[in-house]
Amino acid sequence: MKIAELHGYPQIEPKYARLLLSCISQKETRYAINCVEVSKKTICAIDGKRLLVIYCKHKIDPGLYYLSKEFMLLKNDPDKKFPNWESIIRKDTKEIKIGGFYSGTTKISRLMYRINNTGHHIDFDLYEPVARRIAILGVSDMILEIPKKSIGDRPIQLRFKKYGDTFLFVLMSLSL
């Protein structure tokens, strides 16, 4: 991931920032998840129903950041606690290749159809804003990760690579 600087603050590429913004809580009452978490190898956003993790190389100091409209990362309150997103990611999954994903409503509908054909139904209203951002990236190979065992509500995990980075999008059925 390329990181520029604007006025002394790290600035994320627009294609990445828009994807992260679609997974950041917009509710003022959800102050713990209206930011992004940066670690040594990841940048993560969560809004209680959607989780996006970008596994990438970067030179940003670890911590919590607000993501501004100019795609700058502004340091957040150091006492704020970000949810333990790693506990959400399912490790016991089987992978289903679902092919390419490019811009266009028919393509998004086709992807939704492929996911629903696996027996995993997702809420289009929650998924669609992120799907549009993913489609803009023009992903050629996407993998659907579904739980091997059917235990209650199952999160849907989509994993793909683009620009040398790995993206993991999780759509949860229960709010955090």
Image: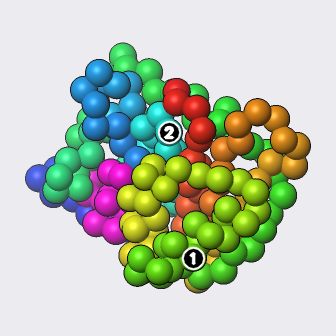
Residue 110 - label? 1
Hey, which quadrant is residue 101 in on the image?
A: bottom right
Magenta portion: prevailing SS class: helix
Q: With 103 as the anchor, is 109 left or right in this view?
A: right
Where disc 2 sits, the SS reads: loop
* Sequence-first disc among 2 and 1: 2
Residue 3 seen in the figure: no
Hey, which quadrant is residue 144 in on the image?
A: bottom right
Q: Position of residue 16 (x, y in %)?
A: 38, 63
- Tell me where the magenta segment starts and ends, as one range: 10-22
Hey, which quadrant is residue 84 in on the image?
A: top right
Q: Residue 119 in magenta?
A: no
**What type is the residue that disc 1 sits on?**
Arg
> How many numbered marks does the figure carry?
2
Q: Viewer-proximal residue, 168 or 174?
A: 174
Give the residue displayed 44% in from the left and 44% down from the top.
45
The crowding category of the residue bearing disc 2, from other C-alpha atoms within 10 Å (few below 14, some 14 to 19, many at least 20), is some
Q: Which residue is mark 2?
A: 49
Where disc 1 sits, the SS reads: helix
